[in-house]
Structures are given as C-alpha cells and as structure tokens.
Amino acid sequence: MNKKTFIGFVVGIPLLVLILIIIILVNEPEPEGISRGAAYKSAALLLTDRGNCEKMLKDQKQEYFPEKEQNNWYVKYMNYLYIGGYLDPGIIPPKRETAEGFLTYQEAESLAEALVPGSGKKIHDGGKKQNTKIPAGEWWDLYEELRETLDKEGNIKELDVLLYGTPTNVKAASAWTAYTSRGNFQFEGISLDSYIDWELKLLVRNGEIIALKETVTDSITYKNVWLASGEGGTFRVYLGSVERTFPLEASLGQPEEFANNIADISLKRGNLQKVTMKKKKISGKVLAVKEDSIEVEGYGSLKLDKDFKVYRLYGQFEERSITDILVGYDIQDFVVAHGRICAALLVREFDAKSIRVLLMNTNFQSIFHSSVTLSAESGLALSYGEKVVNVPPKAEVIIDTTDERLKDGRIVAAPLEKGDSISVNSIRRSYGTPSYGGTVEIRKEGEGLLLINELYLEDYLTKVVPSEMPDSYEKEALKAQAVCARTYAFRQIQSNTYSKYGAHVDDSTRFQVYNNLPTASKTEEAVRETYGKLLFYDNNPIEAFYFSTSCGHTTDGSVWGGDPAQFPYLDGSLLQDSRGVLNLSTNSDFDEFIKKKDYPAYDSAYPMYRWETSVTNRQLEEEITEVGSILNITVTERGVGGIVKKLRIEGSDGIMTINGEGQVRAKLGNKYMTVTKLDGTMMKNFDSLPSAYIAIENQGVDDKNITTFHIYGGGFGHGVGMSQNGAQAMAKAGKNFEDILKFYYYGTEVREAEQSKE
C-alpha cells in the first residue's frame, strides 16, 4: 500500500462512520409523545376518580371550554385541573387544539410542580428542550414518581388483563368501553382497538384505564369459557358479557361437538389455535360454598380452578358470580377437570322450596357450639361418611368436637318417622327445649360445631311468624306477616350470607327470629293460606322490612344511608287511610307532632305509640367519650316522617356528629334508662332507645353540674315498611292481608314466585 492510499484509508474510514451516524440520526424515528388530554387525564386521576371529575364538570359555574366542545372526553379532566389550580387557562388554553396537541417538557414540568413541588426537577434542563414534546416514556417515568407521593392509599391499580373487545368488535357497546377478563373499563383517550385478544398490563382507577403500561403477549388462552353453536362453520364463545364468533377449521372438530360445553380456547394474534373441551360434569346438592372450594353432596369438598366461572344457562345466558351458587339446592351442575371445579352451570331457576338455618346457642350468643345433644320421639337416623346408624326412640346422642363420626366433616340427623321433629337438648329457647322439623346437620369448624336445620320454607315460616308476631293477632295481620316473612326469607336465601357454613340465615334477630316461641294453629293457617305468595315490585321480590309500632308515620329507604330511589315502595307515609305525608323536617314541626299523644293513626292505641324518657350527660358519657363533658344535643337532620338521621353532640372538648337511626338509638340509650309508655307503664333494662323518632329538650344544669335531657319519642323499631301493630289495627278494622301489604309497600303486588318474570 503506497503512502497516498494509506492516508486516504485512514481519513476515509472515520468519515464513513460519521456519515453513517448522521444517516442513522436523521432517519431514527422520533420518540412517541403523549397528548395533553391523555396526560392531564392521568394527572387528574392521581387526585380523584372519573366520577368526581364528571360531578365537578356538572356542578361548576365557570365554563372553560367552548360550548361546542363540552362533550369531548378530556374536558372533565382538564376542568378539574383548572378549578384546582393545577393548570392555568391563560397558559394552557381550554380548547380542542390544546388537548389534542403533544405535551411539552415545560408543560410537564409545570404540571408536576403544581402536583408535587420539587418533582419537576427530574426533567428540567435549563430551557434547552422546554418547548419540544416530551416522549411518552419520560412522562410515565415522571408519573410513577408522582403516583408514589399522591396515591399512598393505592387507589390506582396495575392489572394484568385479557382484552376481549372494544366498540370495534362488540355490537351495541358503549363508547370507550373495554371488555376484559377483569371486568369492563372505560379507556377514554387511549388506543386499545388493535390489542383485542392480547394480554395487557393496565393502570386503572375505579373503572377508568389511565394507561396501557405494557403489551404482554399476543398468544393467549381464554379459560373455562362457554361455547355455543354458530352458523356456517362457526361457533360462539361467551367472554364475560361479550359474545364472539370464531371460524372453525375442520382439523379442530365440528361446530356441533363444541356447542353447550366449557372449554379453553387458545389464540395467536386473534386466530384460533386450539380448543380444549371440558365435558365431565357432576351434580348434587350444594352443602357449602367457600372462597376456594365448593362442597357437593356425594362428592365432598372440591377445590376451585384459578379461572373458575359461573354461568346462568336458563333464560338469558349470563355470566354470574360465586355468590349465585345457592347452598341447599341442586339447581346447578359443575364442570370438573383435573380434580378441580372449572365452572358452575346454573341450570334451573331458584324456587325457594327449602331453607337452611344456623341454630345459635342459648341466648343467641354464638353460631358455634362446644357440644350438641339430640333426640327424637321416634328415634334418629345418623348419617356420616357412608354409614347410617339408627338411634333408639327418645335416646340422646351427644356429639362434641372430638367425635370420630365427624372425621368426614359432618353428621346429618333425621327422625326415623316422617313428621317427627328433632329436639336439640343442648340449647334453650324462651319456651324451653326447642325441636325442629326436617333434618339437623352438625358440621365441624375450627371455632366449634355448627348446627344447621334444613327444612321446607313453608314449615320454617310456621315457626317464624309466631316468633315475630303474637298468634293472638287477627288472622289477616298474621297473613300479612307471613307474606313479609316469606319475601324476606326468599331474598335472604339468594343473598348467601352464610354460604361458607352451608346455611342461608341464622335464627336470631339478625334475620328473622325462628322457633323462639311455639307455633299455633292460627299461625300455621296464616302460612298455609298464603302459600308461596311474595311481594313484588317491578317483577322483583322486595325488601319486606317490618317493625313493631309506628309513631304515626313511617320513613323511607334512606334511613340507613342508601338511595331511596332503590326502594320506591318504601316511601314513608302517615298511618291513616289517606296515606298522606307530613313535612316534619324541622325540629319545631316534629316537636309539635310527637308531643300530641292522641294524633290519629292506625296504631295510636298501642302503648309504644308515644313514650318519654330522661337521660343525663354523665350517663351518656359512658358511651360517648369523644367530646368530654356533654353540654348539648341537637337534631341537625331529619328524614321522612321526622326520624333523626343526624345528631350534633357538643362537649367541653369538641363536637361530634352521630349518623343514622341505629347509631342514634344506641348512643342515646343506656342501661339506666326508664321509658314511660303511653299507658303510663314503665319499661326498664332496655339499653337502646325504642326508636329514632325523637325530640330532645335540654332541661339545664343542676347544682352538681349534671345536665338532664328529656326525650319525647314515638314508635318501636326502625320505622321502615310495615308496622305490625298498625297491621293488627287495620285487620281489626276489616282490611285483608293484601290491603295491608299494599298500604305499607306502595305500588307492590302479591303473587306466587312462579309467576315472577326475569
């Protein structure tokens, strides 16, 4: 190599490298930015949720965006930041061009500083890039630091989901709705349509997607989905609330083989790769439903698959939840694979023919028993494991937690003769030793033994009605009570409160008192003559609340803090034929009303219609310890009929508010209290106020610095729904049970459950 060639080589190589670097830099894709709308949405959701942003948009007086742009998705989020002082409308103009443009370094720094002072330093560079767009990655890195400071309660969640669909592939979908394996979410301002049938990592707050953090994979398997027949070589798949149709290659099978089965389906970029059918089914009465297992009669306790699903097959197909699996019924089939339950199929409508009741111990202190003693006049058949052992007539069986017969978890006792009952000699009720129809099941749990009485619902009601209403009452009142009790029980069975213990309700006042008093022929007739009848509103069984005695006026469904619109049939009214409504929202109006002892109402002749009591601040301070020495008590909010919803307690060390009728009764009642009834008789040993229909008079301070409060009250109970004494008075006046029920539950109808509609 000559000298000239060598010099050219030495100079040329670096020059060539430099040219290549310039070409790469010139042609390198520009980093993806983030729109201001998306960034400001994410910032607003650091502080609150979408619902609050929408509320502020609705409530605000100042309009930032032009009227024609008010419906754009980003408006509520930017408005929230404008109102909060996090954005300056003079610098960031409220208009579409702003929201759709890219966020700059300077804007990101300014917003971060407004949210968390000092946080903008991370991206501050002295002005070199301030007016250029910030790459999306850098914004999200900054966002994570802001989130660490502003979301200490963890309202923002990271979720791994499978994306089923968006409005692109779901007919009649709402705008910006993403259907996923973790539920449905809104995704305003985010592009998701191209990621259907992907596994994604999302950042979410209260049903709104903040960001697509990561695309995990496009090879996914939808587990335990329901397959249905399609048309023309296709089959349908139900994914949550989404119905999808897939073409089926002959190599995978025939469509008719797939229909009405559970399967796993595997896809790659949305294309079907594999279908794994799961056809093994079992059925039987459900004995318990726990978080990770279901006990089925004849099969024992079976673990649930990680992707366990529940589908309703009758009527309109629908995915449901584990709470819809009812203990004590065999209205569902179970699909099993690899020893685990993959899916529950609800195949028949619930008919409420039987109920399972947890029997509490003496004095209703606990659902657990240390030991159980049973007997029956005709003798008992004890079933445990695969054995059935007969016990002689009247002989006692004693079972404790160490009993070997419980090694399989439970013993079921049934009387040897049909119609006989089982005496539970180890517990006491108000009339002595209780006995129960049906069967009694003893289950072993960590805390002790559970006693579950399974019996026909109608038989259960014959022992609920006399425990809730005296059998001396008029037949029509008892029939009204029977319909209320049946409707209440119907809903409680569906609520599955005790499903993990294999029961629906217990026998205490938490539900309906059962078998605390002996039954009588009149109550049995009341149940029989209303057989199967429930109260319906808009084709749904109602919340049939009832209570002892009114103050002359009932209240509405908001008394416990709920939305009264959810219970339109619990509207609150005067207990008079006119069914009017008094405005008793002010203390002066209610005081005048409650002090009228002869105000006309159906139950105005009953002793608890009006009552009085007194209480001192010293007595109240044993329960109310937060405010020091109590100086005064004021009602600050009343509901329909004048019931107290809020109380203000003023004390030497501060002020507190008591909310809700239950808390009002509990806090103002005490063990020293003596209640004087309308008829002059006294009631003692009752440490809660009879009702929250009260007026309070401060009678001043005595020479011992004790303040006395005199309380004028009316009624006994929560005041929602049917007054039992009011029903008795109506029955005495010739009203039938349907008249009574339609009066107390406005707009309802009485009919049998079989006549209800979906």
Image (tube, rainbow, N blue to C red):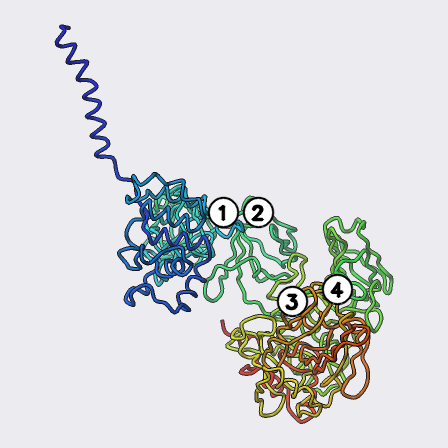
> Would residue 272 appear left or right of 466 to someone viewing this image?
left
Please tell me how crowded label 1 is: few (under 14), some (14-19), or many (20+) other residues with Cα within 10 Å: few
Tell which residue pokes out farthest to the top in this image. Answer: 2
Q: Which of marks 1 and 3 is nearer the N terminus?
A: 1
Position of residue 282 relative to residue 141, above or below, is below
Q: Which of marks 1 and 4 is nearer the N terminus?
A: 1
Name the element at disc 1. helix
**How far is the residue under mark 1 from the one under mark 2?**
43 Å
> Would residue 239 appear left or right of 605 to someone viewing this image?
left
Q: Earlier in the sequence, mark 4 or mark 2?
A: 2
Three-letter code for the amino acid on which mark 1 is drawn:
Thr
Q: Earlier in the sequence, mark 2 or mark 3?
A: 2
Residue with the mark numbered 4: 359
**How far is the residue under mark 2 from the one under mark 3?**
52 Å
Q: Nearer the viewer, mark 1 or mark 2?
A: 1
**How far is the residue under mark 1 from the one under mark 3?**
31 Å
**How far is the residue under mark 4 from the one under mark 2?**
31 Å
As rendered, which of 557 and 87 lies closer to the eye? 87
> Would residue 219 appear left or right of 540 to someone viewing this image?
left
Residue with the mark numbered 1: 149
Please tell me how crowded label 3 is: few (under 14), some (14-19), or many (20+) other residues with Cα within 10 Å: some
Residue with the mark numbered 2: 340
As rendered, which of 268 and 624 lies closer to the eye? 624
